[in-house]
Image: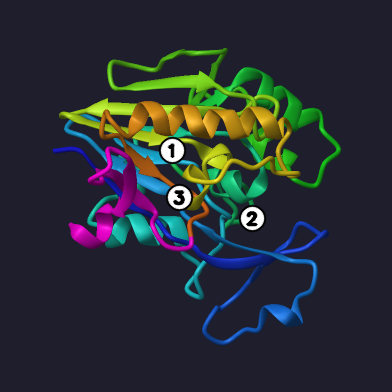
Amino acid sequence: MARAYSLFEGSYSVDVSKEFIPFDPEKDDPKDRPGSLFIHVHPFLIETSSELIVVDTGLGHRRSDGELVIHHNIRSLGFSPDDVTYVLMSHLHKDHANGMIDEGDEHLKLAFPNAKYVIQRDEFAHARTSNSSSYRKEMLDVLTNTPNLMLVDGDGHVNAEIRYERSGGHSEFHQVFHVEADGEHFFFGGDELPEPEELFKRFVAKYDFDGRKARDLRAKYWEQGAPENWTFLFYHSKNIAVGQPQEKGDGSYRIVDVEKSA
């Protein structure tokens, strides 16, 4: 049976510097960090009968013993980072992409050396030429000219289980993923559907490349996915990271926490 796991990396505050500063909701006061957003970071691991898939790679932070947090979390679930077959990247902002590369030694290397990294071609080109501090060009250089880099265009299939759609809501070349395996349908909307609350609020976010498009895409994903019982993966969720729709008595749906009920 296929299953999805949150690889939770922690809670952070982010201000205009775009630096991610650890934030403990039980100890730290948000008033001490004016002008900050407060977010959680959830890369995901999807296990199917034939693949081990990482979906977005987190901040690339390390534990006190030097191990990558994402590697530790994968090993804690009983898997090895070397067994990951695909790394699916919604986009390349550093809070989603820094964990693609291991900076532990003096030279940079792939964090998942046996995986194919699935990235939109235009997103990769844009990130390498952009002057924005949202991207780490030196990390992208590590991927260039490796057999691990799998650049894709528009919509399509990686294999029989994985398909991608270029969505372009949060960033110009953003993509979302469907993983359909072993009777399960996992959907990852990246930063176009980062939290479950956004399924039920129609708003235009200033941080999106095309806020109206992102708003409409969220509605589309829910309208299709709720009756089809998709499992939704929420990258920045404060509560439900892996959720499934549950029908209410009036014919509408709510989202319930899969991990807590497992």
Residue 74 at x, y percent in the picture: 34, 55
Front residue (pair 9, 34): 34
Residue 9 at x, y percent in the picture: 48, 62
What segment is highlighted magenta in the picture?
Answer: 238-262
225 inside magenta stretch:
no
| Residue at which label 3 appears | 196
Q: Determine whether, in the image, residue 244 is placed left or right of residue 194.
A: left
Question: Mark 3, residues whose alpha carbon is within 10 Å: few (<14), some, or many (≥20)?
Answer: many
| Residue at which label 2 appears | 106
**Of helix, strand and loop, which one carries label 1?**
loop
Say which residue appears at 22% left-offset and 35% top-offset.
Answer: 48
- Rounded to the nearest angstrom, the CA distance separating label 2 from label 3 is 39 Å
Q: Residue furthest left?
A: 1
Front residue (pair 63, 170): 170
**Of helix, strand and loop, which one carries label 2?**
loop
Q: How is the image coloured?
A: rainbow
Residue 236 versus residue 192 in the image, above or below: below
Question: Mark 1, residues whose alpha carbon is within 10 Å: few (<14), some, or many (≥20)?
Answer: some
Q: Quadrant of residue 114?
A: top left
| Residue at which label 1 appears | 113
**Of helix, strand and loop, which one carries label 3?**
helix
245 inside magenta stretch:
yes
Say which residue appears at 56% left-offset and 87% top-offset.
Answer: 27
Looking at the image, is mark 2 or mark 3 nearer the viewer?
3
Q: Quadrant of residue 135?
A: top right
